[in-house]
Amino acid sequence: MEHRDLSEADPELYETLKNEASRQEKEGLEMIASENFVPLQILQAQGSVMTNKYAEGYPGKRYYAGCKHHDDAENLARERACELFNAEHANVQPHSGTTANFAAYFSVLEAGDKILGPVLSHGGHLSHGHHVNFSGDLFNFETYAINQETERFEYQDVLKAAKKHDPDLIICGYSAYPRKVDFKMFREIADEVDAILMADIAHISGLVAAGVHENPFPECDIVTTTTHKSIRGPRGGMIMCQKKYADAVDKAVFPYSQGGPLMHQIAAKAVCFKEASKPEFKNYAKQIIKNTSALAESLKEEGIELVSNGTDNHLVLIDLKKEDVTGREAEEALEKANIIVNKNMVPYDPEPPMVTSGIRIGTPALTTRGMKTEEMKEIGKTVADIIKRPEPDVIERSREKVEMLIEKFPLYRGSEVEY
Ligand code: DSN
């Protein structure tokens, strides 16, 4: 086998990687709430020899020989996850958040069982019962809604839905909800109807790990997450649970829904959990909250409406119903100014999903770059300017401001990361 530098072995692909590195470094304000930038140590683990091995099974019980170092890596990831989240058991093998949810459902339910989840346009995820997803196809999903007045999930509404539908499992935790998730409230409701309680903390796991958001344990029975959002690790998923569900969860991941684990990703998850346990990460998570709050205040000062009138976490959801632009138009205009966000349904949205009346904006990635509240205030004003008047002169002026801002906050520049 010939080892060659990627730049020589595959110049076309190398060029593509360089282009993407350059885009991330210089071309835009990354404000998609689910994205982040990982440190070099995560990239190293992901690009390691751990990719070369099949390791079906779990530490100490593999289907192939030669897994002793893979056992060490997976044990590190599992133990660190349990410590970080105060969990009794962790399965770090899910390839993604959606496959984690698949396995989590099937660890305690059978196809056709009833799940109560959020109305999807009220902050849920495709894998929380959308009809185009396995979840909506295989399970009997019923929903609870955001309260139209407070624009939050309220006890009486969720309880009413739970009593009406009598679900086997209730799911809480969202992709586009700017407020804290009240796990105690959900536990009370789950107990009322004798349902299993599952939380999907994919978006907020970094905040939970750092202690700036309530922990879903001990209230929740099963908790799923991705590892690449606010927790700033490699792309992947994870399931944590109370001990009594450990065997069922492990079996539902392998052999029920996955084959060989992606051991290079699992090695990087171990690194991620170590990073997330450090005091620096706590400061990072606190800064995310301060930054999002500054962004929200600045948008409100410019007359922009926010769902629930603010935020407790890493994202704001702009409600554009009273503006002259749709979510799609705002997303496109902001992209022209190199502000990267996504259009998003807002609760009770009159527009379809490809148009929407909302914009979701998150701060984890820019906080990783080192931006603070001052920059967030400036960004809030710029976003508001574009929403109010998405004309070429405003976009051009904003693009120049964005360029100057990015220049001051290097990402991988100066490090060993080449692509
Ligand atoms: N795509 C993720 C998000 O943006 O929330 C969820 O999978």
Image (cartoon, helix red, strand yellow):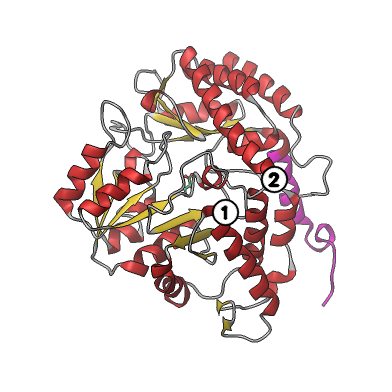
Identify which amino acid the numbered label 1 is placed on: Leu
Q: Secondary structure at mark 1?
A: helix
The vertical placement of 166 against 305, above or below, is below
Where is residue 42, by image quadrant?
A: bottom right
The vertical placement of 73 against 268, above or below, is below
Residue found 43% across the figure and 62% down from its top? 241
Asked whether residue 395 appears in the rendered view, the answer is no
> Could you say where residue 41 lies in the image, as x and y percent from the top left?
74, 54
Number of numbered markers? 2
Q: Secondary structure at mark 2?
A: helix
> Could you say where residue 222 lies in the image, as x and y percent from the top left?
40, 59
Task: Say few, some or many: other residues with alpha carbon within 10 Å of mark 2 (under 14 / 14 to 19 / 20 or more).
Answer: some
Residue found 21% across the figure and 38% down from its top? 156
Asked whether residue 264 appears in the rendered view, the answer is yes
Query: Which dot, 2 or 1, sits closer to the camera?
Result: 1
The vertical placement of 349 against 226, above or below, is above
Q: Nearer the viewer, residue 197 or 88?
A: 88
Is the residue marked 2 within 8 Å of ligand 1, measured from its CB? no
Q: Which residue is mark 1?
A: 84
Q: Which residue is mark 2?
A: 20
Task: Say few, some or many: other residues with alpha carbon within 10 Å of mark 1 (under 14 / 14 to 19 / 20 or more).
Answer: some
Left or right of 378? Residue 33 is left
Residue found 74% across the figure and 70% down from its top? 49
Left or right of 88? Residue 161 is left
Q: Earlier in the sequence, mark 2 or mark 1?
A: 2
Q: Nearer the viewer, residue 213 or 329?
A: 213
Residue 255 among those drawn in magenta = no
Q: Which residues are the magenta region?
A: 1-24
For the view shown, which residue lies furthest in the left direction? 164
